[in-house]
Amino acid sequence: MTERITRWDAADYLNSDEDIQLYLEACTEDDPGDGSLIRLALGDIARAQNFSALARDVGVSREGLRKALSAEGNPSFALMLKITHALGLNVHLSPVAFDRQSDGDRTDQPCGDQAAC
């Protein structure tokens, strides 16, 4: 008996707005800090929807959008905003409190106790 193994694709499972929201939240939390996982997640979301229409909406070619959202991509912030808006998403930025070391420099760990930050 031969087993058939297929490549898993997140885009196949992004069937609702809730699926997309939860997926993007999880990728945002797990992103290493350089936006790479968020960029790839937006690519998955784009593929789950109409990739060609998205490319038209943001004013780039289909190939240009594919390249921008690939692992090797480095899209501008402006393009990322166009992509998120065209997908019906909002970008929300909020301050993060950090633990302060004795010399006043920030560490890379968010502060768990807001009063102590």
Image: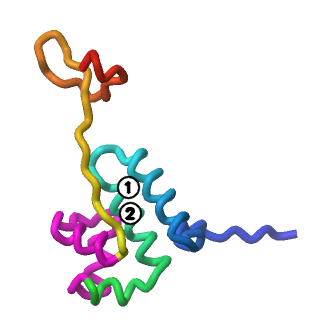
**SS assignment at label 2:** helix
Marks 2 & 1, CB-CB < 8 Å contact: yes
Q: Using the numbered discs, state the Cα–Cα distance from disc 2 to disc 1 in whole angstroms.
A: 5 Å
Q: Position of residue 29 (x, y in %)?
A: 41, 45
User: Could you tell me which residue is drawn at 46 percent across and 80 percent down?
Assistant: 49
Helix, strand or loop for the magenta stretch, by majority: helix
Residue that label 2 marks: 40
User: Could you tell me which residue is drawn at 28 percent across and 60 percent down?
Assistant: 91
Near mark 2 (Cα within 10 A), the count class, few <14, some 14-19 or many ≥20, is some
Identify which residue, 113 or 105, lies in the foreground. Answer: 113
Residue 106 sits in quarter: top left
Residue kind at label 1, given as amino acid type: Leu
Q: Position of residue 23 (x, y in %)?
A: 49, 58
Residue that label 1 marks: 37
Q: Position of residue 79 (x, y in %)?
A: 20, 72
User: Could you tell me which residue is drawn at 57 percent across and 73 percent down?
Assistant: 15
Question: What's drawn in magenta, residue-wise?
Answer: 58-86
